[in-house]
Image (cartoon, rainbow, N blue to C red):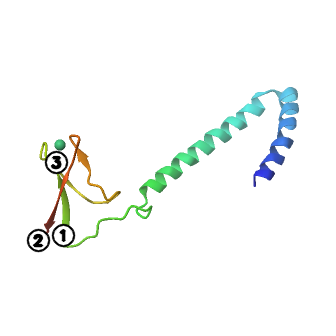
Amino acid sequence: MSRLRTLLLVGAVPLSLIFGLVYGWRFVFAPLLAAVLLSWSIASLRVLVQDARDDDGVPAVQDGPERTVFTCPECATEVLLLYRGTPKAPSHCGQRMTPRTEIVR
Ligand SMILES: [Zn+2]
């Protein structure tokens, strides 16, 4: 794949030089700018799509009779855990939050 790209670049550089000198540089730089913007846009959208998926390695907390609530020992803020990204408890006010398992009625 990279060999093909190298061959395309080796062929495209003299062609674009000739084309730019004969017809004007805007016909060379406009497609290049369009290609860069298109690839950047596609990469940005790909990141958004991958973030929106649920199956990207972050296990969802199972729906069941129990739920885990984390409480901040400093300010008593409570956080309901929906997705467990890491096994560590989240932090608030610079301290680790205290987990508490509740049974939902
Ligand atoms: Zn806090």
Position of the N terminus, as image quadrant, is bottom right
Question: Label 1 sits on what residue type?
Answer: Glu
Question: Mark 3 vs mark 1: which is more N-terminal?
Answer: 1
Question: Label 3 sits on what residue type?
Answer: Cys
Q: Where residue 59 sits: x, y (%)?
A: 36, 64
Q: 98 or 77: which is nearer to us?
A: 98
Task: Indicate the secondary structure of the residue bearing disc 2.
Answer: loop
Question: Label 2 sits on what residue type?
Answer: Arg
Would the CB of label 3 be found within 8 Å of ligand 1?
Answer: yes
Q: 64 or 46: which is nearer to us?
A: 64
* Label 1 environment density (alpha carbons within 10 Å; few <14, some 14–19, many ≥20): few
- Report the side of 7 relative to 99 (left or right): right
Task: Indicate the secondary structure of the residue bearing disc 3.
Answer: loop
Q: Residue at x 78, y 48 (%)?
A: 5
Q: Where residue 79 sits: x, y (%)?
A: 20, 53
Residue 34, image quadrant: top right
Q: Residue at x 71, y 33 (%)?
A: 30
Label 3, label 1: how far apart the Cα atoms are:
20 Å
* Label 3 environment density (alpha carbons within 10 Å; few <14, some 14–19, many ≥20): some
Label pair 2/1, CB-CB below 8 angstroms:
no
Kindly identify which numbered label has been placed on residue 105: 2
Which residue in the protein does label 3 denote?
72
Which residue in the protein does label 1 denote?
66
Residue 54, image quadrant: bottom left
Would the CB of label 1 be found within 8 Å of ligand 1?
Answer: no
* Label 2 environment density (alpha carbons within 10 Å; few <14, some 14–19, many ≥20): few
Question: Mark 2 vs mark 1: which is more N-terminal?
Answer: 1
Q: Residue at x 26, y 51 (%)?
A: 90
